[in-house]
Image (tube, rainbow, N blue to C red):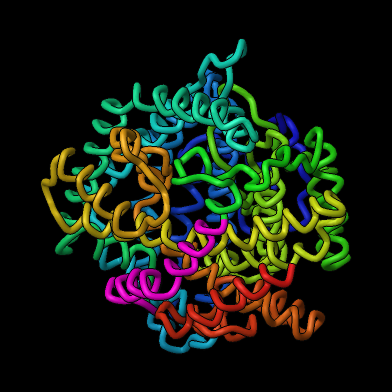
Amino acid sequence: MPTDTLEQLPRAYPRQFVPADLVVKSFADVQPLFEKLLAADLTGKAALETWLKQVTELDAVIAEVGSRTHIRSTVDTTNADFKKAFLDWVENFEPKLKPVFDQLNRKFAGSPARGHLDKSLYGLYERGVLTRLELYREKNVPLETELSKLTNQYDETQGAISVEFDGADRTPQQMGKFQLEPDRDLRERAWRAIGDRRLAEHDKLNELYDKQIRLREEIASNAGVANYRDYQFKAYLRFDYTPADCDAFAEAVEKVAMPAVERSLQRRREAMKLEKLRPWDLNVDPQGREPLKPFDDVEDLKAGCSSIFHKVDPELGGQFDQMRELGLLDLDNRKGKAPGGYQSTLNEVRLPFIFMNAVGVDGDLRTLLHEGGHAFHAFAAANQPLTEYRHAPMEFCEVASMSMELLGLPHMGEFYSGDDLVRARQEFLSGIIEYFPHFAIVDQFQHWVYTHEGCTIQQREDKWLELQQRYSVGVDWSGLESFRRNGWQRIGHLFWAPFYFIEYAIAQIGALQVWLNSKRDGPTALQQYRNALALGGSKPLPELFQTAGGKFGMNAETLKPLIDALEQEIERT
């Protein structure tokens, strides 16, 4: 685990405002700095710009404390010290930050020099500050603290899930490998075993989610917003699309993507010579070949992805190698480790950290390419002057990561050859098509949950099942209704970050545009991609998409040529 190396990272950006020797362990350590900022005279433009640099530096120092605390809590959910530190952060540190940052926002908003700032540089920052001032309520701080604790409980619950199967205690990720096995009976046994184990947590997770929903509804009500969906759209600073656009995307999926999904699954069913596809038939090779095995251990994964990144762009490859050397990769799966994968930016040292759960399957390769794209985004935006601009809107953060999966596609020879290489590419491209309905299901589910205040567990499960039936084709779920009704509990985003999922859909559209550009003119497409990453969050979504060589859009007209291109590429591969 890289927890020790986090304390030994190089500091390429010397502190100017925060004392160089200050070790931040509690709010008391930084309180004098906040008091200094709140007492500053901001009547002149130069004074205000200097003040903003100081706020940015302090924000970065504190945010890195939070990132390190969170990372430790996920690399080992069984470590009592890591858990204690995380709870101390969410209970005693973070709640004290929110009121003081609100005071800083009010000081900025009230400065007579604000009107003299360059809008092209500070305009988006100003809009974000004013929106946060509109939403902030001090009585919501303890509610948000409770939400953070509940999220940690979700991670603990999922991290503790394992199942005794074929003589070994296995994590869900390790059980997932059996879904790639040609033996259909084995796949079904494994599917049911992990499904039954997850159902054992059904009541606990329902209770946890209910608590989160009620807290979020209360937060929205306190802020004077009609419902939590509308609150969260503002909190995410979604100025470039609306809930109506999300509905338009869902309709586009029905019109454009689902026929392609149906064709894909029909080919799978025919190749497998099955009357009906069952859930355990969806990931195995339809020709009955052994599972793709891209690497034996995580060191092989790191080495292969390093080669891919170097072939995409030598500078990106060098950045990945720097992460390897600094211990900023925690890739192997183990019991007690939180599920999933993520990239977290350490804001003061301005370096990325990658977390995932590799078990030696093809999906692990995709995950590291994906998180690598996030990491390159962090490197590219590191020199943005404001902390807020070092992080793009999430809809474009995912363009960075999903594009890297596609830009790496021509270089899969680092892991595969012959038929396996063709197969890996086809499976990846087919998977993109088949995932579009899932984007719609998760997004529409959240819209319903948070616009139907007081909905019951039964109603919520009914809605999930309804959406599953609406956006699913070609798979027989008969006799598996209990598993299907509770499938939403596996989606951590519903617990961690409500309404964070449509970003993946928007970003996949952007990434496919980058990919098509790269097929026409690789060097130009890569340069456009890197130019867009370097902008961080300093420009609105449509301009970020345009800089990357794409066009922001969520409707059927935008989606159809991309689905057509994917199907054509699969046919040619």
- Look at the picture and state if 115 lies above or below 1: below
Q: Position of residue 88 (x, y in %)?
A: 44, 30
Q: Residue furthest left?
A: 454
In the picture, the quarter occupied by the C terminus is: bottom right
Most common SS among magenta residues: helix
Of residue 463 and residue 298, the one placed in the foreground of this image is 463
Up-down relation of residue 272 to residue 153 (above or below): below
For the question of whether residue 89 can be seen, the reply is: yes
Q: Residue lying farthest top?
A: 167
Task: Report the number of discs.
Answer: 0
Residue 330 in sight: no
Q: In which quadrant of the rendered view does residue 471 lie?
A: bottom left
The image quarter containing residue 480 is top left
Q: Residue 201's spot in the image, x, y percent?
A: 34, 25
Residue found 56% across the figure and 46% down from its top = 273
Q: Position of residue 38 (x, y in %)?
A: 41, 60
Residue at 67% across, 79% down: 516
Q: From which residue to which does the magenta span run?
A: 240-267
Residue 264 lies in magenta, yes or no? yes
The N terminus: image quadrant: top right
Residue at image position (68%, 37%) is 358
Q: Find residue 506 and report its horizontal and vertical position in percent.
A: 48, 70
- Front-most of residues 302 and 344: 302
Residue 110 shown left or right of residue 303 in the figure:
left
